[in-house]
Amino acid sequence: MIDSHAHLDSPRYDQDREALLQRAWAAGVHEILSIGIGEGPDTMHRALELSREYSGRPGIPKIRASAGIHPHEARLADEPALAKLDSLLQEPEVLACGEIGLDYFYEHSPREVQKSVFARQMEIAADRRKPIIIHCRPSGTTSDAWDDTLDMLQSQWSRTGLGGILHCFTGEWRHARAAMDLGFLISFAGNVTFPKAQAIRDAAAAVPLDHMLIETDAPFLAPMPNRGKRNEPAWVKEVAATIAEVRGIEPREVQARTTANFGLLFRLPTAAATHDLDP
């Protein structure tokens, strides 16, 4: 399996990060995309540092990295921060720009600032030929952030042909369909296992398996039966199990297909995982 979205640089892992990575390996998680947003632009390099720190260690998943400025910290995206992002995206271990996008729920940064910074980051990612990882959270029961995000992706990203990932998908089927038409994969996190998350499970049943990824968003959103605890990459298997259940297939197929999808998006050898699937 691949955990396609985990915040391995979280301070919540400082005391046992290596043990956590060993547990992930033992659970069958052999690659992790460590999301490089840090606690803000000043620390978005930490994911890359972890990728290098643990590179080649036996019994430890291969750590890939991203880099980006989260919409919460968009107000901090000055020119030095954007130059730092540009520099990080030139590093071979950094696969993607993200997570970036729009968050109208908390609005830690004003909406217009979020849009401006989102657009700038898409420009930088396009120049460096890196896919993007999207964070999108609407203000409540409306689809305001989804509508704005998809409009911006259509007008400012689709022409690149680079695609990306809708991380921790919580939208409606129409949002997923529109994103897939733009070349995006839809990623499901631990909240797909929550008892009241039927709408997310419905989306997981509808999204074609060859357009899907699985993730933990660790240390957040621990899946059942560990809800409320600090999440960790080993538990991505619970996400795969729930998706398999709603689709009426074996977890092994979800694991293998999502691993292959990750490899295809980022042009990695993991795409070869398809040979493990039954005809």
Image (spheres, grey):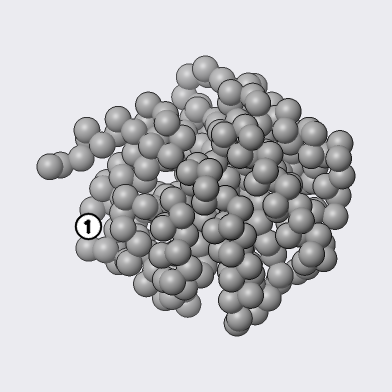
In this view, which residue lies farthest toward the left? 279
Residue drawn at x 76%, y 59% as measured from the top left = 114
Query: On the image, which quarter does residue 71 sit in?
Result: bottom right
Quadrant that contains the C terminus:
top left
Which residue is disc 1 drawn over? 249
Specify the amino acid type for callout 1: Ile
- Image coords of residue 38 (percent x, y): 74, 42
Residue drawn at x 34%, y 39% as measured from the top left = 260
Quadrant that contains the N terminus:
top left
In this view, which residue lies farthest toward the bottom? 141
Residue drawn at x 51%, y 37% as measured from the top left = 32
- Image coords of residue 266 (percent x, y): 46, 35
Residue 48 lies, with reference to residue 197, above or below; the image says above
- Image coords of residue 262 (percent x, y): 42, 40
> Could one spot residue 240 in this view of the protein?
yes
- Image coords of residue 208 (percent x, y): 31, 58
**Is 6 or 219 nearer to us in this picture?**
6
**Is 77 or 34 nearer to us in this picture?**
77
**Is 102 or 5 nearer to us in this picture?**
102
Count the numbered circles shown: 1
**Is 107 or 14 nearer to us in this picture?**
107
Q: Secondary structure at mark 1?
A: loop
